[in-house]
Amino acid sequence: MPLPPPEKRELVHTRRIECRGYRRDDGLWDIEGSLIDTRTEAMETFGRGKIAPGEHLHEMWLRMTVDSDLTVRAIDAKTVHAPYSRCPDFPDRFGKLVGQRIEPGWTAKVRVLLGGRWGCTHLVELMGPLATTAVQTVYAWRGETGEHLEDSVAPPEDFINTCHTFAEGTEVVHRLWPQHVSKAPSDDNPS
């Protein structure tokens, strides 16, 4: 582990989030994600009773189908395990994302459409890594070499200034999007 050595401790809870991106034969992309929580100690819930150590406290799945410009075409959600019997019966509001594009502001849009009393905290949380996986899957397919660029409508504006590496004026932006460079490369930190 690259972090400094920790203090003496005992593992209590593990959350695993796994996402996978698939290219489909019909030109669309399936992005699948799961969220699984387990505990090292038994847990008593009034909804499910005793949950044994290692048993899934939460097990939730999402499949989002997107096109090459990251517009959602279909989405399915399933809760297999949760601490309360009501959890799997959340209102199926995920269809509200069909037709929406994954772009800056995506997380806020998901929270407005699916958050709070209208959805599931954990599935809404899973939408973030799912969206990131969609971007990595679809745009990595383009490649930095320019292959498939004609098939992608990913405007550089979707990336520029989204992180310190893609900050306007950096060497990376100069290399990837030279036509959108407005100033010399700079890795200056504003602080």
Image: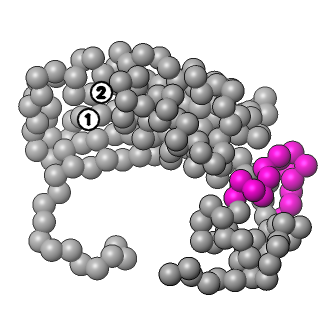
Q: Is residue 123 above or below residue 46?
A: below
Q: Is residue 147 above or below residue 77?
A: below
Packing grade of label 1 (10 A; few <14, some 14-19, many >=20) is many
- The residue range painted magenta reads 145-159
Residue type at the position of mark 2: His
**Label placed on residue 56:** 1
Q: Is residue 112 above or below residue 3?
A: above
Percent of width and height locating residue 1: 34, 73
Percent of width and height locating residue 148: 86, 51
Q: In the shown orientation, is residue 122 left or right of residue 94?
A: left
Q: Label 2 near label 1: C-beta < 8 Å? A: yes
**Residue behind mark 2:** 81
Toward the front, the furthest residue is 191
Query: Would residue 149 be counted in the magenta stretch?
Result: yes
- Taking the spot 40% from the left edge, 25% from the top edge, the residue there is 119
Q: Is residue 36 above or below residue 78?
A: below
- Taking the spot 59% from the left edge, 27% from the top edge, the residue there is 97
Indicate the quadrant where residue 186 lies.
bottom right
**Secondary structure beneath disc 2?**
strand
Percent of width and height locating residue 120: 37, 29
Query: Would residue 2 be counted in the magenta stretch?
Result: no
Q: In the shown orientation, is residue 177 left or right of residue 191?
A: right
Instruction: Judge by depth and name the residue closer to the eye, 52 or 68.
Output: 68
Instruction: Judge by depth and name the residue closer to the eye, 149 or 170.
Output: 170
Magenta-drawn stretch, dominant element (helix, strand or loop): loop
Residue type at the position of mark 1: His
